[in-house]
Image (cartoon, rainbow, N blue to C red):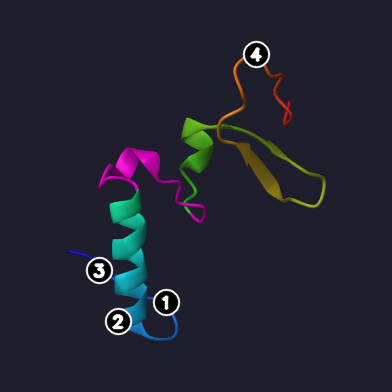
Protein backbone atom coordinates (compact mmCIF):
# COMPACT_ATOMS: atom_id res chain seq x y z
CA UNK A 1 0.00 0.00 0.00
CA UNK A 2 1.34 3.44 -0.94
CA UNK A 3 0.29 6.38 1.19
CA UNK A 4 0.94 9.75 -0.51
CA UNK A 5 2.70 12.38 1.54
CA UNK A 6 0.62 15.21 2.92
CA UNK A 7 2.75 17.78 1.10
CA UNK A 8 2.62 16.05 -2.29
CA UNK A 9 1.24 18.16 -5.11
CA UNK A 10 -0.33 17.30 -8.44
CA UNK A 11 -2.02 14.03 -9.25
CA UNK A 12 -2.01 11.69 -6.25
CA UNK A 13 -2.82 8.82 -8.59
CA UNK A 14 0.27 9.56 -10.71
CA UNK A 15 2.38 9.77 -7.53
CA UNK A 16 1.18 6.33 -6.44
CA UNK A 17 1.73 4.87 -9.93
CA UNK A 18 5.26 6.34 -10.17
CA UNK A 19 6.12 5.02 -6.70
CA UNK A 20 4.89 1.59 -7.76
CA UNK A 21 7.11 1.63 -10.87
CA UNK A 22 10.15 2.71 -8.82
CA UNK A 23 9.49 0.06 -6.16
CA UNK A 24 9.15 -2.68 -8.77
CA UNK A 25 12.36 -1.53 -10.51
CA UNK A 26 14.14 -2.21 -7.19
CA UNK A 27 12.76 -5.73 -7.05
CA UNK A 28 10.49 -4.54 -4.23
CA UNK A 29 13.55 -4.32 -1.95
CA UNK A 30 13.10 -1.07 -0.05
CA UNK A 31 16.71 -1.18 1.20
CA UNK A 32 17.87 -0.54 -2.39
CA UNK A 33 15.99 2.73 -2.68
CA UNK A 34 17.43 6.10 -1.73
CA UNK A 35 14.83 8.45 -0.32
CA UNK A 36 16.54 11.69 -1.29
CA UNK A 37 14.27 13.83 0.89
CA UNK A 38 14.66 11.64 3.96
CA UNK A 39 16.70 13.17 6.77
CA UNK A 40 17.91 9.75 7.92
CA UNK A 41 19.95 9.26 4.72
CA UNK A 42 22.82 10.80 6.70
CA UNK A 43 22.60 7.90 9.16
CA UNK A 44 23.31 5.37 6.43
CA UNK A 45 25.67 7.11 3.99
CA UNK A 46 28.78 9.26 4.28
CA UNK A 47 27.94 12.95 3.82
CA UNK A 48 29.28 16.46 4.15
CA UNK A 49 27.62 19.81 4.59
CA UNK A 50 28.78 22.67 2.36
CA UNK A 51 29.15 26.22 3.71
CA UNK A 52 25.77 27.12 2.19
CA UNK A 53 24.10 24.28 4.14
CA UNK A 54 23.67 21.89 1.19
CA UNK A 55 24.25 18.27 2.23
CA UNK A 56 25.91 15.87 -0.23
CA UNK A 57 25.62 12.14 0.45
CA UNK A 58 27.94 9.55 -1.04
CA UNK A 59 25.89 6.51 -1.93
CA UNK A 60 28.34 4.05 -3.41
CA UNK A 61 31.84 4.84 -4.61
CA UNK A 62 33.53 2.25 -6.81
CA UNK A 63 35.70 -0.34 -5.10
CA UNK A 64 39.04 1.23 -4.24
CA UNK A 65 37.79 4.75 -5.02
CA UNK A 66 38.42 7.48 -2.45
CA UNK A 67 35.56 9.29 -0.79
CA UNK A 68 34.69 12.54 -2.52
CA UNK A 69 32.72 14.02 0.34
CA UNK A 70 35.29 13.91 3.13
Does residue 8 sit above or below 51 in this rendering? below
User: Left or right: 68 with respect to 45?
Assistant: right
Residue for badge 1: 8
Could you tell me if residue 5 is visible in this image?
Answer: no
Q: Earlier in the sequence, mark 1 or mark 2?
A: 1
Q: Nearer the viewer, residue 12 or 61?
A: 61
Quadrant into which the N terminus falls: bottom left
Q: CA distance from mark 4 to mark 1?
A: 39 Å
Which residues lie in the magenta part?
Answer: 26-37
Mark whose residue sits in front, 4 or 1: 4
Residue 21 lies in the magenta-colored region:
no
Quadrant into which the C terminus falls: top right
Dots 4 and 2: beta carbons under 8 Å? Answer: no
Q: Earlier in the sequence, mark 4 or mark 2?
A: 2
Residue at the (43%, 76%) spot, across then down: 7
Disc on res. 64: 4
Mark 2 surroundings within 10 Å by alpha-carbon count, few (fewer than 14), some (14 through 19), many (20 or more): few
Residue for badge 3: 3
**Rendered location of residue 38, percent (x, y):** 47, 52
Mark 1 surroundings within 10 Å by alpha-carbon count, few (fewer than 14), some (14 through 19), many (20 or more): few
Does residue 44 sit above or below 30 in this rendering? above
Mark whose residue sits in front, 1 or 2: 2
Q: CA distance from mark 3 to mark 2?
A: 11 Å
Q: Earlier in the sequence, mark 3 or mark 1?
A: 3
Q: Earlier in the sequence, mark 3 or mark 2?
A: 3
Residue at the (74%, 29%) spot, across then down: 68
Residue at the (47%, 32%) spot, across then down: 44
Residue at the (68%, 19%) spot, across then down: 65
Disc on res. 13: 2
Mark whose residue sits in front, 4 or 2: 4
Amino acid sequence: MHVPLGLAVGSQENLVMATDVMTKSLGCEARRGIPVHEERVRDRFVFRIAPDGLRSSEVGPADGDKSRVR
